[in-house]
Image: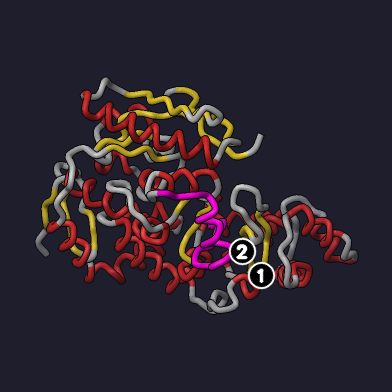
């Protein structure tokens, strides 16, 4: 099959528009549809402030907790995402072999036999009932059940392992039931309670991964097969099976001198080829964990320059200054004053600097008005400590 050649600049311009990063959009639903998901909590608000004109924190909370169009869901591999409600079963049931292996090892170490496992699983669901419980409360209630069940749950690692296996089976989820996202605690809840209108438990794991694969290449393409496997967390064999199922319906692309083929549905390719950027080198400020940075194994390596990789490492997710979709620096926020400081990897042209300052003023005003309790959190980075943000003092 012939391959289509496109430039990284065209891909970035097209994806920036789809993400709602340039130009910004007027609809929260349109923004999330374009970027596919949001990191939860602080970064969800900051990510939408970068995408949606006139966005307020309450807008997202309304869509999640009142309308129910989106759900905050802790997926495998430790990520918490805000994503379309209808996509939740595919995320929950996609197999993550490493997570399952670790859970199985924990139960084996605690000498929990096969029959006892079912007793444990049923006990967790019985205690959860029709409400959601944080893990601490769940642990205490299970220990008080007494007998063999209480004894087994008292062993280190048994409850997390049981919850891990229940999550992969689609029987239990971890989410925020009460909101708002910046304050509501994440709790464990039975999926039949959380998603009464969705068939989660009965969804086959292989089918779930195929659903996720189709969605991934439609929303995040062009991408490699390895990108998909990395994103979904599945082992190589299962990810390859899902990819090969959809491969006949994907177009192969080559981007500049990138060594590996990338894939995208034909409809998306057509839209991208016909797309014309409205401005050269648009500027955007995206927060920690933003989909632009985390939807591929190495977004900077795919569509950027080596200088950014050297600064941030593969798969950067720190608060980033984007110029034409490439990471060109970091930013920091002083919430009380609404000040956003820009730290460039190299001195930008005056027109780029002016656009970035405009974006910084917009973000600073949003934070000062909507997130004055935003506080810095220092994380280690490839080139030294990097500051991200959390809500609350």
- Could you say which is closer to the camera, residue 262 or residue 267? 267
Does residue 55 show up magenta in the picture? yes
Tell me which corner region of the image, top left, top right, bottom left or bottom right, holds residue 259.
Answer: top left
Mark sitting earlier along the chain (2/1): 2
- Whether residue 310 sits left or right of residue 1 in the image: it is right
- Whether residue 270 sits left or right of residue 325 in the image: it is left
Q: Which numbered circle lies on residue 208? A: none
Q: Quadrant of the N terminus?
A: bottom left
* Range drawn in magenta: 54-75
In x, y percent, where is residue 147? 90, 66
- Whether residue 380 sits left or right of residue 112 in the image: it is left
In x, y percent, where is residue 301? 29, 39
In contact (CB < 8 Å): disc 2 and disc 1: yes
In x, y percent, where is residue 220? 32, 56
Q: Quadrant of the C terminus?
A: top right
The residue lying at 47 percent from left, 68 percent from top is 90
Q: Badge 1 local density, few (<14 within 10 Å), some, or many (20+)?
A: many
Q: Which residue is mark 1?
A: 190
Q: Which residue is mark 2?
A: 173
Secondary structure of residue under mark 2: strand
The residue lying at 28 percent from left, 46 percent from top is 22
Is residue 98 visible in the rendered structure shown here?
Answer: no
Is residue 311 visible in the rendered structure shown here?
Answer: yes
The Cα–Cα distance between marks 2 and 1, rounded to whole angstroms, is 6 Å
The residue lying at 67 percent from left, 52 percent from top is 185
The residue lying at 23 percent from left, 65 percent from top is 265
In x, y percent, where is residue 76? 53, 56
Q: Badge 2 local density, few (<14 within 10 Å), some, or many (20+)?
A: many
Secondary structure of residue under mark 1: strand
Does residue 290 show up magenta in the picture? no
């Amino acid at each position: 099959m012939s391959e289509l050649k496109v430039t990284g600049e065209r891909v970035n311009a097209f994806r920036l528009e789809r993400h709602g990063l340039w130009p910004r959009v007027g609809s929260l639903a349109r923004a999330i549809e374009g970027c596919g998901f949001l990191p939860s909590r602080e970064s969800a608000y900051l990510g939408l402030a970068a995408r949606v004109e006139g966005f307020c924190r309450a807008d997202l909370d309304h869509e999640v907790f009142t309308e129910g169009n989106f759900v905050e869901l802790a997926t495998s591999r430790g990520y918490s995402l805000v994503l379309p409600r209808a996509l939740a079963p595919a995320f929950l049931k996609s197999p993550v072999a490493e997570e399952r292996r670790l859970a199985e090892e924990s139960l084996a170490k605690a000498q929990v036999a096969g029959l006892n496992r079912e007793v444990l699983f049923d006990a967790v669901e019985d205690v959860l009932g029709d409400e959601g419980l944080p893990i601490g409360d769940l642990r205490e209630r299970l220990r008080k059940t007494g007998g063999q069940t209480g004894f087994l749950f008292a062993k280190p690692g048994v409850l997390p392992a049981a919850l891990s296996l229940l999550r992969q089976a689609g029987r239990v989820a971890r989410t925020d039931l009460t909101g708002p996202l910046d304050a509501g605690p994440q709790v464990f809840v039975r999926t039949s309670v959380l998603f009464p209108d969705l068939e989660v438990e009965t969804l086959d794991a292989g089918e779930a991964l195929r659903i996720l694969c189709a969605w991934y290449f439609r929303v995040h393409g062009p991408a490699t097969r390895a990108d998909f496997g990395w994103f979904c967390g599945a082992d190589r064999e299962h990810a390859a099976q899902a990819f090969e199922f959809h491969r006949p319906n994907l177009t192969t692309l080559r981007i500049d001198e990138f060594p590996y083929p990338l894939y995208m549905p034909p409809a998306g390719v057509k839209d991208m080829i016909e797309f014309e950027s409205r401005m050269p080198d648009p500027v955007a400020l995206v927060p920690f964990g933003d989909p632009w940075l985390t939807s591929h194994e190495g977004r900077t390596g795919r569509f950027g320059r080596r200088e950014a990789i050297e600064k941030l490492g593969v798969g950067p997710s720190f608060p980033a200054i984007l110029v034409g979709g490439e990471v060109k620096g970091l930013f920091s926020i002083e919430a009380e004053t609404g000040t956003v400081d820009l730290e460039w990897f190299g001195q930008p042209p005056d027109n780029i600097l002016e656009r970035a300052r405009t974006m910084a003023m917009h973000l600073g005003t949003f934070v000062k008005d909507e997130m004055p309790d935003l506080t810095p959190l220092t994380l280690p980075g490839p080139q030294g400590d990097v500051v991200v943000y959390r809500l609350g003092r």
